[in-house]
Image (spheres, rainbow, N blue to C red):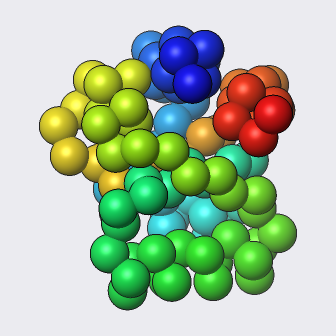
Amino acid sequence: MNNAMGILGLAARARKIATGETVMKQLRSGKVKLVILSKDMGDNGKKKLLDKCSFYHVPYVFMECDEINQAIGDRNRKSVAILDEGFAQKLQTCLKG
């Protein structure tokens, strides 16, 4: 998990992520390659994002909220969209296996 946090931090420093309300906008525009959701995200927000991900065929993974926020240097983000294919592939391999 520590490796995934490092990659997420690099993506944040390279400005290849979207957080907050911009996640939905970026999903609609087709720029999102991966969505990272917090495990303790609320049911309504989680359902909304998962529905959008399945509609636009965007993969998603779950991470702890504290790890997401520590990696991107923010306080309370529940979802992060990765906008770069390379970062998305590397994060998927780190978080799934």
Q: Left of 63 or right of it: where is 88? A: right
- Residue 90 versus residue 79 in the image, above or below: above
Q: Quadrant of the C terminus?
A: top right
The location of residue 54, given as percent across then percent down, is 75, 77
Q: How many marks?
A: 0
Q: Please name whichever residue, 63 or 54, is drawn nearer the observer in this view of the structure.
A: 63
Quadrant holding the N terminus: top right
Q: Is residue 10 above or below residue 56?
A: above
Is 7 drawn above or below residue 77 in the view shown? Answer: above
User: Is residue 88 toward the left or the right of residue 39 in the image?
Assistant: right
Please tell me in which quadrant of the rendered image residue 82 appears: top right
Residue 67 visible to the viewer: yes
Q: Which residue occupies the foreground of this view, 78 or 56?
A: 78
Left/right placement of residue 69 relative to residue 83 reads: left
Image point (49%, 67%), residue name: 24
Is 72 drawn above or below residue 10 in the view shown? below
User: Which residue is painted at 76% across and 58% down in the image?
Assistant: 59
Query: What residue is at 30 percent from the left and 37 percent from the top?
Result: 66
Q: Position of residue 16 (x, y in %)?
A: 56, 29
Quadrant housing residue 11? top right
Image coordinates of residue 39 in percent, x first then y, are 44, 58
Q: Which of these two is toward me, 14 or 78?
A: 78
Q: Is residue 85 visible?
A: no
